[in-house]
Amino acid sequence: MSEANTAVSQVAILIPSLEPDERLPAYIQQLSENGFGMIVVVDDGSGEDYQEIFRTVEKTDRTVVLHHDVNHGKGVALKTGYRYLLDQAPGIRGVITADADGQHTVPDCIHLAEMIQNGKRALYLGSRDFNLPHVPPKSKSGNKITSTVFKLLYGVWLPDTQTGLRAFRKEELPFMLEVNGERYEYEMRVLIACATHDIPMIPVTIETVYENGNEGTHFHPIRDSYRIYKVILGGFIKFMSSSLICFAVDQALALVFREWLFPAVGVAKGTLSNINLSGYSARVLSAILNFQLNRKFVFQLKGNAGNALLRYVVLCVLIITVSNFGVWALGKAGMVSWLAKILMDTLLYFASYRIQQRWVFREERRDG
């Protein structure tokens, strides 16, 4: 058996399917003829009208069809397949997920199967070329915007964030099952989980297929886009909320300390000592609150809070130092100080989010 055939025979194809057409049996047959070790199709509540198609699919060699009585969503369908492969596929070394609408070609699946064989912990993403002339405009613009937002918030550029063609080692199945999500947003949560757990995501160029203007997709442009962007922006919105709360607390405490508390113990209003004591005291308390909100509410750290606190303090000192240096440097270059301060603090705010996400509040990495 050739090396390519060996690679394919050790890989399972998982296809979630809702109300498929006649293309699905032909696609499954091609996958089987090319020697994939197992093909798992999940009928996500398609209904009685589609069961003849699934019965045809199930007759294909090395193919299993799992059924949901009602539609639960793509995320649930994928997890149903993952659990089956984890329990019932001892000879499988890798998993490829593909869509049932004809967009993912058999040669591309074979190429991904070969890439899994290196044993590296990674998520391989079949990435389409959205600059081709036959790509629908809404797909082209939507994917580029999503890729840009993902890069800004998570530090990884992915040319195709919505691809359903993905490949990974079988060892990653427990990780995939732990990721929350039931419908199309689940796949975005997987990307975010990989970014925050330092699991490499490797784009692999694939054929860009849009049959009949992509009419076969069950992706709802408004509803499912809302779910996806809610996932992408959810963490950052929480981070902004935490920042606004702590800013308000900082200002209120500084006012109370400056106008009433410190004057009551003999530190006169308007003096430099009063201003410094009030400002630093308020900032320390608001920073403690910010740390706790970020730890529990934003990043939901379950690990060691002591190590995270130390990293948080280091980050705060670093941000203040870089901000002050940046304002000074931009001032030397001719920029007015107030504009330089706004520019530096805005850039550092986004940087702080990513650093807290990836370093300060990171969970302990798994071996693998």
Image (tube, rainbow, N blue to C red):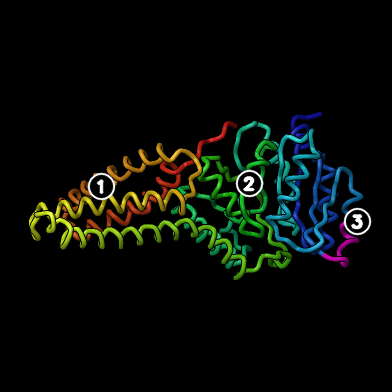
| Amino acid marked by disc 3 | Arg
Residue at figure coordinates x 58%, y 53% from the top left? 189
Question: Foreground: 263 or 178?
Answer: 263
Q: In which quadrant of the rendered view does residue 77 lie?
A: bottom right
* Helix, strand or loop: magenta stretch: helix
Q: In which quadrant of the rendered view does residue 321 lie?
A: top left
- Residue 260 screen position, x and y as percent: 16, 62
Mark found first going from the N terminus, 2 or 1: 2
Relative horizontal placement of residue 169, taking residue 198 as reference (left or right): right
Disc 1 target residue: 320
Disc 3 target residue: 55
Mark found first going from the N terminus, 1 or 3: 3
Relative horizontal placement of residue 104, taking residue 133 as reference (left or right): right
Q: Which residues are magenta?
A: 47-56
Disc 2 target residue: 178
Residue at figure coordinates x 59%, y 49% from the top left? 190
- Residue 126 screen position, x and y as percent: 64, 48
Q: Is residue 133 above or below residue 322?
A: below
Residue at figure coordinates x 26%, y 62% from the top left? 252
Magenta segment includes 51 = yes
Which mark, by number, is residue 307? none
| Amino acid marked by disc 2 | Glu
Q: Residues within 10 Å of mark 2 (few under 14, many from 20)?
A: few
- Residue 71 screen position, x and y as percent: 76, 63
Relative horizontal placement of residue 276, taking residue 367 as reference (left or right): left
Separation (CA) of disc 2 from disc 1: 37 Å
Separation (CA) of disc 3 from disc 2: 31 Å
Relative horizontal placement of residue 125, taking residue 282 as reference (left or right): right
Residue at figure coordinates x 73%, y 65% from the top left? 216
- Mark 3 and mark 2 in contact? Answer it, CB < 8 Å: no
